[in-house]
Every structure is written in structure tokens, then in C-alpha cells.
Image (cartoon, grey):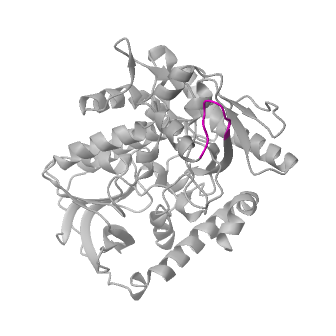
Amino acid sequence: MKKYYDTIVIGTGLAGLYTCLNLDPSKQVLLISKEAVLRSDSYLAQGGIATMHDDSDFDSYYDDTMRAGRFENSPAAVCEMINQSRSVVCDLISKGVCFDRRDGDLEYTREGGHSIFRILHHKDITGKEITTKLFERVSELDNVTVIEHTMLMDLTENKGSCCGVALRLESGEVKLVGARDVVLATGGLGGLFKNSTNFSHITGDAISIAIGHGVELANIDYIQIHPTVLSLKTKGRRYLISESVRGEGATLHNEVGERFIDELLPRDIVAAAIHEQMKKYGTEHVYLDVSAIDNKKLKEHFPNICERCLAEGIDVDSMRIPVVPAPHYLMGGIKADINGKTSMPHLFAVGECAGNGVHGANRLASNSLLESLAFSRNCAKQINFNDSDEKLAIISKIKDEYKDLTSWYDNSRHLIMSEIKKNNEVFYDKWCYNEDNS
């Protein structure tokens, strides 16, 4: 690891990888992963990537996204994402990503909130397919240095501008590394919850660090609760039952076997309806019935979901799947524009940690992968465009608190939970109180 890079990218999900792929190859780039490179929530994404089906689909796609976001979305961000969707998909295919096809043509599916079939997929492991292929392309770049098992502890700044980072290496050593630009692509904060669909190490680190530096946030309380994750007795990361399963015809039933909701309504509405049924009958889950889906199609399209259910003693051929809502995705985060620029000069945020307004108050299904790709490409172009020889010296020092991870995490959790409570006490009391006081 050198003492200085042109750009430091923190996070190896789709946003971090695609940023690297779109940066000028003349730039020396350091790409940091908190754990192994592919242990990102992007890798876990099942359903697919939404895209504008054709030019006539723009208005419908725009309306679906705005409606799901309760019209709190940024119209400019939504337009930007949709307009980039076709070129992003073409670029992914050129980089080796394989989407499912039927008779040679791309096969589209549908999920909750979408008015037409416009979601591309690779079986039920779309995130794994895209992330793996993009990391293969990043590995071919001579200008990118990848370091795993390294944690972002802090930002360094000079005259109010970001000028580098403090990193904790796997050995426990802390190093200050300088950069002209720093890109935060660290994902969400689901790891702060006992039960979520996120990897446990994804704990909102960049967000708490941003709070400490006075970097502006946006809607930190907008945390999406996914309606259907596999209900288990054990604690820890929950296995997500993709919305595509409902898109293909699966139905939700309560304890007495009644269907109680239109399964293709936006996620917040479905999650609230499930929560109400659980409360009504005093149960810990409801049931997802997949019997309406052709068995061959179910096994071909959702092989990993079927295998995971079977491993938990649930045979989808004859049994309903017990499902429960759980924290899934952060729609807010570090406030950023459509180019990833934050309120701190030379600091950028992309992907789930960025609050660019594209999702509003509730993300439309399968918009997350597209968002990560579209705005990280914009971010890289912005960094390329603003090329200069400016090099701010690191004036920060290694702080004692970097060495005590337990205290560091406790403080980080407190900062984030306090911000959530300040913004939305009702949401905090329902979903965060027990997490903050455990």
C-alpha cells in the first residue's frame, strides 16, 4: 500500500467496482474491502436489475418508481437512472454478464410495484452474476490495487476538504493514506440489526464517520423493510425470498389460510400488511404459497431459494414458506447529487450509503443494482472531468480510538441510531429501539 493514491474507493459491491471500471486508467486507485471482496450485499441480490424495456416504457417506469417512493423521490435522479438503464445493461453484457434469455431474447420478469415485466435476471442469483463478472474485469486493471479485510476508521481532512482515510489493516495496524478523491461505497446499515437481509459486517461505518465530520445526511430513517424473508428460529442474517417469486404468482396467506394482500403492491404496503396479520393472530410469520407457479419454472428460475428452503426442512413442492418482514435496504444515507458529490469537497458517496433521492421513501423492487451502477458511473466521470494536480497534505494523526474496535462500533451505532430517532421516532420505536438498547 502506498502513502498516496489519486482515488480511494471504499467498498467492493457494485458501486465500488463500477466506479473503478469507469475511472480514467491513468489514475492510481486503491480499492478497499472490509471483508473478502465478494462479501457485499450486491452479491446477495436475487431478483434482478430493472431497466427501461424500451423508449415507450419511460413514463410507466418513472411513474412506478415515483409511486413506490411515495413521490418523495428526486425527479432528476429518477430520470437519470432510467435514462441510463439501457446503456448500463449493454455495458454489463459487454463485460461478460449473462442474463437469462428465452429463444435468444432477454427474458424479463416482474416484481412488486412494476406495471410491466422489465426486470432482467440471472436465475435467482443476479447480484452474484454481475458482481463476480465486474470483479473479474477490475482484477484485469493495472491501475487498481485491491486490499481485503481492511476497515475504514475515519476520513482525514484539510481546510474542510477530504484528503484521505484512516484504515485499519487485518493485522490491526492503522495507516493514514492520502488521496485527491475518496469514494464511499460501503453499503447500508442492516448489520446493526439482529435480523436483516444484510451481511453482519455492513454496519453503516461510512455514515457514522460522515456524521462525525459534519457531512450532510439525507433521510437516514428511510430504511426499507423487505416483506418476505425466510422465518427462522435462529438469529442473524435472514435469507431473502425474492420479490420475483411473488411476481411469478406466489401468494401470501395468514395463519388461517386467508390471502390478505395484493402481493405486487410496493414493499412498504406489503410489509405493513404482513405485520398486521402477525399481530392479529399472534404469530411470528405468515406463509408464502408457491403452488401457483409451474414446478419446472420454480426450480429453474429459483433454484437457490428452493435449495435453501429444503435445507431448512421446507419442501416447496408440498409446503408453504414461512416468511416475515425484516430490515433490508437504506434509501437515505450520505446526501449526494447524481454525480455522487457530497457536502465535503473531494468526498463522494455512491450505492446504498448514498442518499441521492432516487428511491424516495420506499425503493421500487430491483432498482438498487441499477442505481448503484448508474450513479457510480456518473461519479467516476465527475472525478475524471475534475482532473487537477491538487494534492492536500494529510494533517490528521492516528487516534487512540482507532485501536479499540468495540468502543468504535458502540460509538458508531449510537451516532446512527440517534440520527434515526431524531428523524423518525415512530420508526425508531418500531424497528430500532430493541437494537439500540440490547
- Residue, far bottom: 400
Residue plotted at (25% across, 65% down): 179
Q: Left of 379 or right of it: where is 421?
A: right
- In the image, 44 versus 396, the foreground residue is 44
- Residue, far top: 103
Residue 412 visible in the displayed image: yes
Q: Position of residue 250 (x, y in %)?
A: 65, 28
Residue 23 visible in the displayed image: no
Q: Position of residue 276 (x, y in %)?
A: 81, 45
Q: Above or below — where is 113 with respect to 331?
A: above
Residue 94 is one of the magenta-drawn residues? no
Quarter of the image holding residue 364?
top right
Q: Which residues are magenta?
A: 313-321
Residue plotted at (45% across, 60% down): 343
Quadrant the C terminus occupies: bottom right
Q: Position of residue 305 (x, y in %)?
A: 52, 38
Quarter of the image holding residue 21?
top left
Residue plotted at (81% across, 43% down): 277
Q: Left of 125 or right of it: where is 293?
A: right
- Residue, far right: 280
Q: Position of residue 238 (x, y in %)?
A: 57, 52
Residue plotted at (41% across, 29% down): 85
Q: Left of 418 or right of it: where is 5?
A: left
Q: Above or below — where is 47 with respect to 284?
A: above
Q: Left of 57 or right of it: where is 4?
A: left
